[in-house]
Amino acid sequence: MQVRRGVRLAELTTLAVGGPIERLVEVSSAEELVAAVREADEAGAPLLLLGGGSNVVAPDEGWPGDVVLVRSQGIERDGDRLTVQAGHDWDDLVAFAVENRLAGVEALSGIPGSTGATPIQNVGAYGQEVAQTITAVRVYDRAEKTERVLAPAECGFAYRDSRLKRDPARFVVLEVTFGLRAGAGSMPITYAELARTLGVEIGEPAPLADVRDAVLRLRRGKGMVWDAADPDSRSAGSFFTNPILPADATVEGCPSWPAGEGRVKLSAAWLVQHAGFGRGTRDGRVGTSSKHSLALTTEDGATTAELLAFAGRVVATVEEKFGVALEREPTAVQP
Ligand SMILES: Cc1cc2nc3c(=O)[nH]c(=O)nc-3n(C[C@H](O)[C@H](O)[C@H](O)COP(=O)(O)OP(=O)(O)OC[C@H]3O[C@@H](n4cnc5c(N)ncnc54)[C@H](O)[C@@H]3O)c2cc1C
């Protein structure tokens, strides 16, 4: 366990905003993670868990307590099951699965951050989400002060959401188990843009490595692979979720997809763009990415206040123009 002082949240988050941390505790195993959380809870210190910092909007005031940086590593294989430590880099796990001919997470290539954070918002992209393959999540339950294993049904997974996200002060993810499918072919491709890129029909599989390559290519073109050299990736990925509404609430011209019984999912990117915030709309040191209207990006010296004010203007304009309330995807963490 390594303790540092004087580090800024901006140094640990992909949006590169956020003030000084009172005490930064870096842990490299599940045991150290539990010990660090227990210590903070016993001391009554505000606690923030951080993996890759790619889905948080961090406060300008900084963190007046403990930030626990989760850096536990390791993948354990048992047949087609992989049990992965929370701090393990997500894309490294996807690469491992593809190299070892295990299907189920290939369309989630190139998503930044840690494996332990993937169940929090049920990470998803290009037709896959982790809820499809997670078989168990080992957690430390801060309310019960004990370790336990959550079955998928107990995780309350939904679109970019879970029980863990809804109750952020309770569960610390220690490791995640994925049940994958052995073979060289991917799961059936369900996302039209990916199927087109691969030259397959919707519902057909493709070679695992081809799917990974195609997804990485598509994502890079949208600034959706984190890269210090790409200012368009200085973001938290999509800043807003696609709104899910009653099926009769469609907006003319806006792409939409069925979202279960009597519900429809609208394209947040379209709504943002048609509200006047197309790609590359800047307001001082914040704005939309030049490659994707749904990603908000920052420049050197930007503040969280500026970012949230810009996001607020986007939400208000979309509401005014289309009567649709956008919701933020990353968590604006507060002590
Ligand atoms: C360029 C870019 C592209 C992206 N594309 C996608 C995408 O396609 N799909 C998608 O779903 N997301 C995407 N994201 C968002 C983000 O990468 C994912 O949500 C990722 O899972 C976050 O992982 P992290 O380790 O960085 O989490 P962090 O940002 O460190 O944390 C996120 C939240 O989880 C909590 N948390 C972290 N670790 C733990 C733990 N061990 N136990 C309990 N709580 C924990 C934190 O306290 C925080 O509330 C993108 C982000 C960027 C920057």
Image: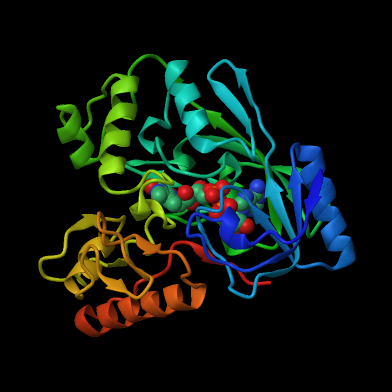
User: In this image, 67 relative to 208: left or right?
Assistant: right
Name the image quarter holding residue 87.
top right
Q: Residue furthest bottom?
A: 320
Image: 20 above or below 112:
below
* Residue 118 makes an appearance in the image: yes
- Residue at the location (69% across, 63% down)? 169
Q: How many marks?
A: 0
Residue 180, horizontal then vertical, whole percent? 48, 25
Answer whether residue 146 is visible to the viewer in this image. Answer: no
Residue found 71% across the figure and 59% down from its top: 170
Residue at point 58% right, 67% down?
Answer: 18
Quarter of the rendering occupied by the C terminus: bottom right
**Depth check: 109 or 166 in front?**
109
The residue furthest front is: 300
Q: Quadrant of residue 2?
A: top right
Q: Position of residue 206 (x, y in %)?
A: 26, 22
Residue 42 drawn at (x, y percent): 89, 62
Q: What colouring does the structure picture have?
A: rainbow
Could you tell me residue 286's position as x and y percent? 37, 70
In this rendering, would 194 be left or right of 31? left
Locate the N terminus by quadrant: top right
Q: Nearer the viewer, residue 71 or 320?
A: 71
